Amino acid sequence: MSRVKGGVVTHRRHKKVLKLAKGHRATRHALYRRAHESMLHALKYAYCHRRERKGDMRRLWVIRIGAAARAGGLSYSQFIGGLRKADVGINRKALAEMAVNDSFSFFKLLTLASDRLKS
């Protein structure tokens, strides 16, 4: 059986890893072994943080809704409780968007929630 040299395949794989590690500091973008470690960590962080971003966005929405609700005289929890009692099924993303861009509609929901809390 003839000898098979793997130089082309190895070189291609190394180039792919070094391309992914482009922009990393020091030897982490230049030396294959260091670049491979750096690339694995970077890909792991990217995977984890894609999931973490969902919670970050929800926290941002809650902060925005809470600020707009406080401007109307209710706390965040009172506002959400009032909406639940009024059977308004609107999610936090839409509420936050409304609070920032459509304050008139948000104020209507705010008055609806406060009315439901009083009754």
Image (tube, rainbow, N blue to C red):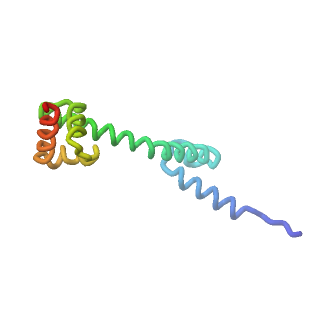
Furthest residue in direction right, as rendered: 1
> Which residue: 39% across, 44% down?
54
Q: Is residue 71 left or right of residue 14?
A: left
**Vertical order, 49 against 11 (above or below):** above
Residue 95, image quadrant: top left
Q: Is residue 1 left or right of residue 65?
A: right
**Vertical order, 22 against 49 (above or below):** below
**Vertical order, 86 against 117 (above or below):** below
Q: Which one is in front, 36 or 106?
A: 106
Where residue 99 appears, as percent x and y from the top left, is 18, 43
Furthest residue in direction bottom, as rendered: 2
Q: Quadrant of the N terminus?
A: bottom right
Q: Is residue 69 left or right of residue 48?
A: left
Q: Quadrant of the C terminus?
A: top left
Q: Which one is in front, 74 or 29?
A: 74
Where residue 12 appears, as percent x and y from the top left, is 64, 61
> Which residue: 54% across, 55% down?
19
